[in-house]
Image (cartoon, grey):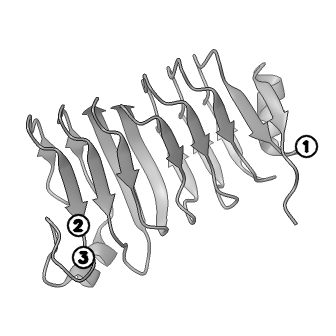
Amino acid sequence: MYMPAIDNCRNLKSVHIGKKDGTKAEYDPDDYESFISKLDILAMIINCESLETIEIVKGGSGGLNLGILNGLPSLKSLDLPDNIVCLSGISVCGIVQFDFTEHCLVARDMFTGMPELREVYCNQELKLITRSFVDAPKLEYVEIPSMDTEIEKSFINCPELVLGVLKGSKAEEYALNNSIKIKYLQERQ
């Protein structure tokens, strides 16, 4: 099941999905749990130049995939539930800082052409970063607090980047092999 595309909405300021404080939000199907648990890719929000916020109040019990947010230069806030398992296709947005959701396992084709992105904080469960963080000229810091996060074809054309990594981690190895500056993190107990 796919959510219908939101495309070329020139005056749209915000998108809210799910219930909020017991009231209906802007998109709240009658059987929200059934809808959201069947949702494979949430969004295809593209070329909405005035969109500032996207909020998804809760996900289904099985987790969500979020994909294709593109051409949103005014997007500053992306509020997601903790059970997003795969993020993909977020590019050309005005987001400055991003914290990965608690259960996100894969970041694919993320944060490409992000002119304002400065900081990203990954979770300890993140297993794969692939084809992400490309052409983000202001990106200063990405924290990867896992020993096992695999990185492929990422962090390209990010001249200011410092990776926060654990000593001996796969992220450290990737940084060293690709001449990326490192800040060592303390391993969490």
Viewer-proximal residue, 175 or 161?
161
What residue type is disc 2 on? Met
Mark 1 packing: few (<14 Cα in 10 Å), some, or many (20+)?
some
Does label 2 or label 3 sit earlier along the sequence?
Answer: 2
Q: Which residue is drawn at 13% across and 65% down?
A: 26
Question: SS class of the residue under badge 3?
Answer: loop
Q: Label 2, label 1: how many angstroms apart (C-alpha)?
A: 42 Å
Q: Label 2, label 3: how many angstroms apart (C-alpha)?
A: 20 Å
In this rendering, position of residue 78 left or right of residue 130 = left
Viewer-proximal residue, 21 or 161?
21
In this rendering, position of residue 27 left or right of residue 172 = left
Cβ atoms under marks 3 and 1 closer than 8 Å: no
Q: Which residue is drawn at 29% across and 35% down?
A: 70
- Name the residue beneath numbered marker 2: 1
In this rendering, position of residue 38 left or right of residue 134 = left
Does label 2 or label 1 sit earlier along the sequence?
Answer: 2
Which label was assigned to residue 19? 3
Q: Which residue occupies the extreme front position in the image?
A: 21
Q: Is residue 143 above or below residue 64?
A: above
**Quadrant of the drawing holding the N terminus:** bottom left
What residue type is disc 1 on? Lys
Q: Label 3, label 1: how many angstroms apart (C-alpha)?
A: 42 Å
Q: Residue at x 67, y 61 (%)?
A: 125
Which label was assigned to residue 167? 1
Does label 3 or label 1 sit earlier along the sequence?
Answer: 3
- Depth check, mark 2 against mark 3: the one in front is 3
Question: SS class of the residue under badge 2?
Answer: loop
What residue type is disc 3 on? Lys
Q: Position of residue 183 (x, y in %)?
A: 82, 34
